[in-house]
Image: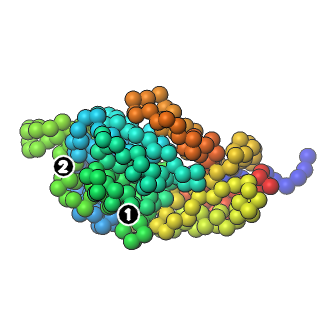
Amino acid sequence: MSGAPQPAPVPFVDLRRLQAPHRPALEAALSRVLDHGIYILGPEVGAFERQLTAYLGAADAAGVSCGTDALLATFMALGLPAGGEILMTPMSFVASASSVLRCGLRPVFVDLPADSYHPSASAFEAAWGPKTVGVLAVHLFGEPFPMDAVAELCARRGGVLVEDCAQAIGAHAADGRAVGLAGRAGTLSFFPAKNLGGVGDGGGVYSLDADFVAHVRRIRQHGRAARDVYDELGGNFRLDALQAAFLAVLLPALDGWVAARRANAETYLHALQPLVAAGRLSLPRDRVGHAWNQFCVRTPQRDALRQALTHAQVGHAVYYTRALHQHRALASARPPECLPNAERCCAETLALPVYPALTVAERDRVIEVVSGALS
Ligand SMILES: Cc1ncc(COP(=O)(O)O)c(C=O)c1O
């Protein structure tokens, strides 16, 4: 028995590494909350909301229980007519569409171009019908959705525009503003593996319209207008005080984390270029303001690539194995005729490790294994 030692496994994501430098501050936040004993809303949530509002350049931001409830509370607050249709991508997490359906609205899936993770504004325009009431734009994988044309479309046709920024805190539009400010509201997820991940679930809703956020705050507390006064339906969509205290510790690290994600992505974009030239791989588009929550390559040889990565113990994931219209749970969405590009995308896409605490040696190992598998 001999040979070089096996290289160490490369995790797809390791949150402990990210949080290790912040552990003393997280423990101090935990002690503070246990000391004051205000576990629901209160000063921790208020302080985090002010910090988040300033970071995003919004008029206001409300903490909520998760990214799913951020969408749900937003659509509940919008109060759109039942059966109204929301145009959206078929390429996203199930919650983007299920929240629309749970509010009595119908998602209408608009196919992607062959080479993009975002539907085009012209495809949204072509899909706009008599029942359309708005667009949900998803900043998938942290790639800013180009909003100008979609915002213009919604303004011209009198529809609402909501941005699902669950994967995109830290991303910004071409004008330098945070994503999520082009329409009525942006929604966030603080699921641990997101760009700003909590120590559990969390989410947020933000807007340039402070009245809208005030409405979301009522909806997140069962539609509470005042003590024991409930004028509309809401839910329990509150962000935990403890989670807010943790997120307040971690938010100042976000821009550094996004910069590290970007450095990883830029290295991959450069190092994997020969595979693109050889026609074996497609790389994600590098847009200004991309926050790189995921680095998703595409290849028709995905199974072979997955096998090689698994064999080499290099973490990877598929987002998503099915497009939204292929989920039975979403069958009451308006059935699309055919969404071939989204389906092909789901058959070819593969996410490589891009999280901020990836080491240079680990990144090089990813490049070596991918290059070896597809050469
Ligand atoms: C695009 C998108 N929207 C919504 C959500 C829902 O967020 P949460 O898991 O915090 O409910 C997610 C989470 O993965 C997401 O990726």
- The kind of residue tagged 2 is His
The answer to whether residue 297 is above or below residue 100 is below
Within 10 angstroms of label 1, few (less than 14), some, or many (20 or more) residues?
A: few
User: Looking at the image, which is closer to me, 131 or 314?
Assistant: 131
Where does residue 69 sit, x and y in percent of width and height? Answer: 32, 42
**Residue of label 1:** 148
Query: Farthest residue toward the bottom?
Result: 175
| Residue 277, image x, y percentages | 74, 62
Asked whether the residues under the numbered discs 1 and 2 touch, taking CB atoms below 8 Å apart as contact, a structural biologist would say no
User: Can you tell which quarter of the image residue 181 is in?
Assistant: bottom left
Residue at 40 percent of width and 34 percent of height:
334
Total marks shown come to 2
Dot 2 falls on a residue whose secondary structure is helix
Quarter residue 171 falls in? bottom left
Residue nearest the viewer, comparing 41 with 187: 187
Q: Is residue 17 left or right of residue 171?
A: right
* Circle 2 residue: 215
**Residue occupying image coordinates x 27% and y 55%:** 184
Q: Residue at x 43, y 29 (%)?
A: 331
* Alpha carbon distance from label 1 to label 2: 26 Å
- The disc, 1 or 2, on the residue closer to the chain's N-terminal end is 1
Give coordinates of residue 276: x percent, y percent: 71, 60
Determine which of the numbered discs, if any, sits on residue 320 in the image.
none
Left or right of 208, for residue 285 = right
Residue 239 appears in the picture as rendered: no
